[in-house]
Amino acid sequence: MMRCRRATRWMVTALDGELPARRRRALDGHVARCPACRHEMATTAAVLQGVGGLATSSEVPGRLEQATFRRVRLLAAAEAERAATRAWWMRLRLPVLGFATAVVAIVAVGLMRSGDRPLAPRPGDGGRRVVAQAPTKDKPPLVASRERRDPKATATVPAEPPPQLAAAPELFMDLPLLRNMEKLEHFEAIRTTTLDDGGEQSNG
Amino acid sequence: MSRLGIVALLTAMLAAPAVRAQQPRPWHQLSPDEQRRAWENYRRYQQLPENKQRSLEERYQRFQAMPPQDRDRLRQNYETYRGFDPGQRQEFGQKYRRWKSGQH
Amino acid sequence: MATVSADEAAPESAERPREVPAGSTPDAGSGFAAAAADPDVALMLRCQSGEEAAFQDLFRKFSPRVLQFARRFVGSEARAEEVTQDVFVQVFRFRHRYRPQSRFSTWLFTIATNLCLNEVRRPERHLRVDLWNRRDGEERPEGPPLPDPAAVTPEEGAAARQLGQRLEALVAELPPKQRAALLLSRMDGLAYRDVAEALGSTEGAVKALLFRATQTLKRGLRDYL
């Protein structure tokens, strides 16, 4: 036999139509016999009906719609740009890979053909020349020179940001706003300032 | 000031009760786009002289301590400012200089 | 971040006629079948293909509900609009994660719930009681339980409005997860399993949340009942 406490716990679920059939029959049987639970069931139904009658939607101002669409367009444009950059690299990779393979093949063939013949020493270095050389200071590594050719290229965002960036990422996100903070704080006053020499000026 | 000092100062600023009123989002909660933007701006910030960096940190602290509606207002003004065409921006710059000279 | 669950077991026999979620029937496993059954799914699939118009249609259809939902969690109208905007930007940003086996509204309100619950955790939010013009200390009339919302006499209309205000205030005071569960299940027509998905929880937990929320509301409306 069902107790009132359990019946009360099942009421909301039953009224929402989410109580399994067997339990619903048990609950209905109990409510039929128990005036207190009958009242509780009616009260619960009334409360849920009242909540259901509250406003479920708000009028959306035009500025919200425009701002959202603008943000989404910017996002789409950024995605397209990233995709184009990735595509460019992908297109470049295959020819580069092919070229690198060809170079390796040529070097390998050259080595095989040279057989036991030692490599000809460079004049003046005492015959200590090796095939692969680490970059010297006269010949900077490719990455550095590439950076010098395109210093404004955006570097990849690090997975782990530097401590200063991690400590206050929103400072850096809002940097352009912060740089113009005074202008933005007194925006209207500045906009209403006249440029005529004889006119009054607004001091905000 | 050493980098460690800057980190400690920023961390202390963030722990201060005034700044606690606005807890900034941690790095991992930023979207990829926001992370990229923050990272690019961070690189620009690194190029600035130390006094300018300090000034920006102070402004950030002030911005974070503002009531939400004031921050909203500044963001809205920034959006408007960004939407200026070159002519409008030039005119705004002139008005700003005129306004500023009238403040002193 | 919002994730979309794949196949879930169909709910136990539902007695109240609820809209059957797309993909809950055994033969609705494909996106095409789901799209045919649910126009919102079709719009979302088009959005995934890059159709701007489809996204705009989804926004226009659901933003009023999302905005109203957000208003019940944040401290200002401006912030509610921002949260609404953030919800739809997330919808676009993570559109490729949406799986048509789930209802679009479930996925949408998963995102909305996450952002709203995050919002509640921000320290500078204001109490929302003042948004609902709560009038404490007012004499509450004796009378029949819960006046008919479709009342026609001025007295009944005033009582209904007063009840609405009282209910709004009580809902605003509920703990955030109870409030979210109540709003999602009551106002937005989601089944318990959808509410559970939106909350990142279980159906059992949703039932418990709804029970506690309803008990609180009943206590708060005792003078009306």
Image: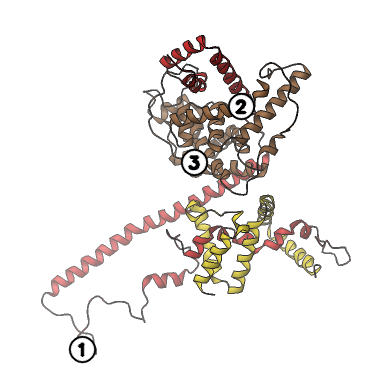
Mark 3 burial class by Cα count in 10 Å: few <14, some 14-19, many 20+: some
Q: Residue A171: name its quadrant.
A: bottom right
Label 1 secondary element: loop
Residue in the image at 60% along x and 54% along y: B22
Question: Residue A126: which disc?
Answer: 1
Relative to B74, is A66 above or below? above
Asked whether the residues under the numbered discs 2 and 1 touch, taking CB atoms below 8 Å apart as contact, a structural biologist would say no
Q: Which chain is brown?
A: C
Question: Residue C50: which disc?
Answer: 3
Q: Nearer the viewer, mark 2 or mark 3?
A: 2
Tell me the distance, in whole angstroms, between the alpha carbons under discs 2 and 3.
50 Å
Relative to C5, is A193 above or below? below
Q: Which colour is chain A painted?
A: red
User: Chain for mark 1?
Assistant: A
Tell me the distance, in whole angstroms, between the alpha carbons under discs 2 and 1.
97 Å
Residue in the image at 78% along x and 19% along y: C154
Q: Which colour is chain B painted?
A: yellow
Name the residue tied to disc 2: C219
**Dot 1 amino acid type:** Gly
The spot of residue A67 in percent (x, y) is 63, 45
